């Protein structure tokens, strides 16, 4: 004889409690109330289970039924993900809008992948082959020029009994194993569990971002992790969006976690119109957007980051280079804090749960360059770049400090630079990269043999510039010796023409390594020419710096094919300055 059916006994915002649910598993999905709201069990005490509800709980009443689903929060992985826009729990917003209108109705359900689309499958494994999790069964053309490798689910192994070429939906069997296990184009995976890999590989090549200040001064390796903290108005979202548009990655997963709705609406409107300058195809052809704005339920915000990184790992396992942009992890941490407070957990610093550092570390540790599980051998990389919004721009707050303990690079944004209209507003004194050494050989081979020397000279000049500006503010620049006045002027040219970059200029929004290399080389050539002129007896007033400054600005705004000649003109101007 079965016992009483579980019902709600307490509701507090995004959290609800139900009993009897003693048989519920931790992180098991449930359907809550008459509307069937999606929720997840996050605590079980005796017969009472605590549920975080991923949808708006307004109107939910005590006594409404709760139904266990027997599975955890999973995402369906397969062809059709590229170009999609998902909410925090994996529902495609376009299809939800067709069914419910512009607003997501409580209890709305939609499969992550379109179950009606047909895909042409080409098998690569003959019948009788022994396969295991991660092996490539075959391929489909997901987007023009993009090969989607159909993988054996990580938990499946056996001998292929049938595998046929043909056209299939994501759920139709395209073959089977000898034990009867069906093989399909898609499979589900729990978002909170990292996907298995063959082994981790050392980092080497950088993720070329197209942003000079990052590629030149603070590079990130493919498979690395970055924290981008900055106060309000410092340009975090613009940087994340610029990286999503121009970074040299095969696949980009952009997670808008708790951001303002108007910003995400701008992303959704702009991305479909953008053309990838490398392939000539729309940027959306290589992008997956996960959207959870600030007015969406807070519990789904916490899940959205895990959903995004699971999708990114899936394409990494195919052997692709994937970049994950999370904007912003502070909003994710605030969701943890709100849920922790409703659970009456012991608060840590500033009210954040004591496990904040552990959760953040587990998220960032899913980045890496790996040898994928299975055959044939494939190398993939997942680079994680997370924006952080510290209150008041205070980098000593818990989320920033927890991130700094686990990331390999810090791109710190400075409000003072933003107020001076210096964008990207990266503080070159606070920022750092632990990947400079491992990427040094790659840059020397691909950009210029003296890339590292130019980088060191530029950082030294900027450091000296900061010291001299403090002195100049006290005594005035005219009181400085000519060599120091020249250094101040050279540093200003580097800040404006090399480190500064306009996201709205079609020629300056993204900078190739060749353009960056030539621009830096020309700027330092002007400085060294000025030093030689001063050593020859000229005074600072006799130096004509206006012409090289104008030419450097022209190099910055030049298109790729114009850069070599413009940079040569700037160097010629520097030689004339020395003469």
Image (tube, rainbow, N blue to C red):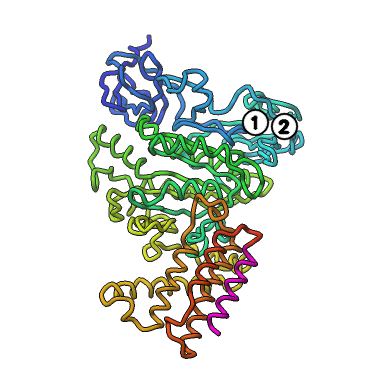
Q: Residues within 10 Å of mark 2 (few under 14, many from 20)?
A: many
Q: Residue at point 42% right, 44% down?
A: 327
Mark count = 2
Q: Identify the disc placed on residue 185.
A: 1
Q: What percent of the width, then of the height, locates residue 150?
A: 66, 36
Q: What percent of the width, then of the height, locates residue 41?
A: 36, 28
Residue 202 shows in this picture = no
Q: Is residue 537 above or below residue 391?
A: below
Q: What percent of the width, then of the height, locates residue 9?
A: 26, 18
User: Are the residues at dot 2 and dot 1 in contact (C-beta closer than 8 Å)?
Assistant: yes
- Between residues 322 and 460, which one lies in front from this camera angle? 460
- Between residues 468 and 378, which one lies in front from this camera angle? 468
- Between residues 276 and 323, which one lies in front from this camera angle? 276
Dominant secondary-structure state across the stretch colored magenta: helix
- Residue 482: quadrant of the picture: bottom left
Which of the two discs, 2 and 1, labels the residue nearer the N terminus?
2
Q: Is residue 578 above or below residue 398?
A: below
> In this image, 441 relative to 2: left or right?
right
Q: Is residue 61 magenta?
A: no
Q: Is residue 570 magenta?
A: yes
Q: Residue at point 57% right, 64% down?
A: 555
- Which segment did they paint magenta? 563-579
Q: What percent of the width, then of the height, locates residue 176?
A: 69, 28
Residue denoted by label 2: 121
Q: Secondary structure at mark 2?
A: strand
Residue 177 shows in this picture = yes
Q: Identify the disc placed on residue 470.
A: none
User: The N terminus is located in which quarter?
Assistant: top left
């Amino acid at each position: 004889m079965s016992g009483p059916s579980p019902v709600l006994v307490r509701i507090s915002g995004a959290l609800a409690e139900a009993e009897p649910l003693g048989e519920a598993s931790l992180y098991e999905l449930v359907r809550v109330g008459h509307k069937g709201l999606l929720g997840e069990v996050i605590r079980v005490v005796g017969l009472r289970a605590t549920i975080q509800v991923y949808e708006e709980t307004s109107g939910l009443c005590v006594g409404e039924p709760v139904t266990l689903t027997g599975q955890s929060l999973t995402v369906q992985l397969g062809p059709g993900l590229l170009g999609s826009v998902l909410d925090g729990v994996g529902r495609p917003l376009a299809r939800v809008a067709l069914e419910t209108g512009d607003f997501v109705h409580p209890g709305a359900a939609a499969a992550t992948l379109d179950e009606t689309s047909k895909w042409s499958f080409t098998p690569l494994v003959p019948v009788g082959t022994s396969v295991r999790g991660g092996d490539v069964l075959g391929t489909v053309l997901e987007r023009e020029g993009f090969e989607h490798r159909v993988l054996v689910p990580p938990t499946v192994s056996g001998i292929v009994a049938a595998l046929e070429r043909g056209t299939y939906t994501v759920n139709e069997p395209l073959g089977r194993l000898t034990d009867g296990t069906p093989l399909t184009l898609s499979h589900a995976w729990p978002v909170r569990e990292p996907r298995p890999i063959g082994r981790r590989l050392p980092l080497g090549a950088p993720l070329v971002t197209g942003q000079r200040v990052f590629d030149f001064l603070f590079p990130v390796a493919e498979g690395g992790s970055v924290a981008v903290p900055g106060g309000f108005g410092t340009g975090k979202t613009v940087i994340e969006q610029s990286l999503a548009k121009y970074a040299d990655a095969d696949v980009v997963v952009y997670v808008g976690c708790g951001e303002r709705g108007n910003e995400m609406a701008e992303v959704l409107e702009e991305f479909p119109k953008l053309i990838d300058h490398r392939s000539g195809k729309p940027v959306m052809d290589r992008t997956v957007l996960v959207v959870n704005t600030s007015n969406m339920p807070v519990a789904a915000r916490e899940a959205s980051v895990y959903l995004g990184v699971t999708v990114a790992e899936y394409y990494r396992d195919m052997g692709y280079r994937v970049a994950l942009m999370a904007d912003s992890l502070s909003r994710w941490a605030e969701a943890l804090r709100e849920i922790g407070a409703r659970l009456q957990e012991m608060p840590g610093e500033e009210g954040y749960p004591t496990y904040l550092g552990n959760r953040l570390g587990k998220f960032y540790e899913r980045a890496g360059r790996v040898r994928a599980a299975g055959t044939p051998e494939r190398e993939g990389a997942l680079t994680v770049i997370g924006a952080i919004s510290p209150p008041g721009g205070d980098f000593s707050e818990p989320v920033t400090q927890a991130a700094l303990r686990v990331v390999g690079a810090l791109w710190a944004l400075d409000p003072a630079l933003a107020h001076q209209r210096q964008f990207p507003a990266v503080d070159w004194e606070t920022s750092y990269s632990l990947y400079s050494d491992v990427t040094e050989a790659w840059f020397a081979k691909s950009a210029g043999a003296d890339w590292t020397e130019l980088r060191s000279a530029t950082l030294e000049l900027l450091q000296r510039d900061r010291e001299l500006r403090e002195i100049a503010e006290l005594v005035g620049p005219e009181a400085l010796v000519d060599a120091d006045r020249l250094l101040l002027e050279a540093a200003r040219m580097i800040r404006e023409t090399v480190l500064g970059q306009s996201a709205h200029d079609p020629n300056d929004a993204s900078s190739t390594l060749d353009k960056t290399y030539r621009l830096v080389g020309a700027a330092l050539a002007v400085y060294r020419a000025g030093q030689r002129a001063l050593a020859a007896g000229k005074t600072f007033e006799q130096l004509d710096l206006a012409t090289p400054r104008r030419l450097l600005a022209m190099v910055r705004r030049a298109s790729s094919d114009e850069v070599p000649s413009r940079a040569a003109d700037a160097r010629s101007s520097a030689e004339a300055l020395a003469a």
